[in-house]
Image (cartoon, helix red, strand yellow):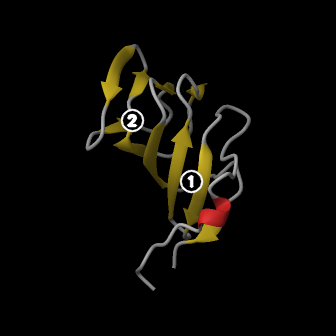
Amino acid sequence: MGLVTFDERDADNLVAGHYSTGRGQVLRSDMMELTKIRFDAGKGAEMHQHPEEQILYVLDGVFEVTLGEQVYEVRPGQASYHPSNVPHRAVAKEATTALSFKLLVDPNYDKTGELV
């Protein structure tokens, strides 16, 4: 309990195929979701929104994020905060890996493991 490990067998899991090309591991507890997600250059998540607040922390690469009407870049060591129900999108300007943190409200895609 406490140690979080991403199972590399799930690294090619399509996270949310209905709006995103991101692949990676999705870990959940009863209240949180942590996803290690990667995108190829030029790929990303289409404009969408969800009731969960989200923080997208870039490990490597660069995202161009649109949050409402605002457009900005997010680089390694930076994060983008997406408030509840605010439309947003992210496009990788180069191959990009990030951690996505969400407080769960209503998950709409499958998990690959548990946060315990």
User: Dot 1: within a 10 Å radius of its alpha carbon, few (fewer than 14), some, or many (20 or more) residues?
Assistant: some
Residue most toward the left?
77
Mark in front: 2 vs 1? 2
**Residue 106 seen anywhere in this rendered image of the structure:** yes
Q: Which residue is drawn at 51% across and 79% down?
A: 116
List x then y, in percent, for residue 27: 56, 64
Q: What residue type is labelled 1?
A: Val
Q: Which of 33 and 73 is in front in this view?
A: 73
Q: Nearer the viewer, residue 116 or 85?
A: 116
Q: What residue type is labelled 2?
A: Gly
**Disc 1 secondary structure class:** loop
List x then y, in percent, for residue 65: 41, 25
Residue most toward the top?
69
List x then y, in percent, for residue 113: 63, 69
**Do the residues bearing badges 2 and 1 touch, measured as CB atoms within 8 Å?**
no
Q: In which quarter of the image is residue 9?
A: bottom right
Q: Residue at x 57, y 65 (%)?
A: 28
Above-or-below relation of 7 to 54: below
**Disc 2 secondary structure class:** loop
Of labels 2 and 1, earlier in sequence is 2
Say which residue label 1 marks: 105
Q: Residue at x 42, y 79 (%)?
A: 3
**Residue 51 seen anywhere in this rendered image of the structure:** no
Question: Is 18 left or right of 26, judged from the image as shown?
Answer: right
Say which residue label 2 marks: 61
Question: Marks 2/1: CA distance?
Answer: 29 Å
User: Dot 2: within a 10 Å radius of its alpha carbon, few (fewer than 14), some, or many (20 or more) residues?
Assistant: some
Q: Which of 93 and 109 is in front in this view?
A: 93
Q: Nearer the viewer, residue 103 or 43?
A: 43
Q: Which residue is drawn at 46% across and 44% down?
A: 97
Q: In which quarter of the image is the N terminus?
A: bottom left
Question: Is 24 left or right of 116, judged from the image as shown?
Answer: right
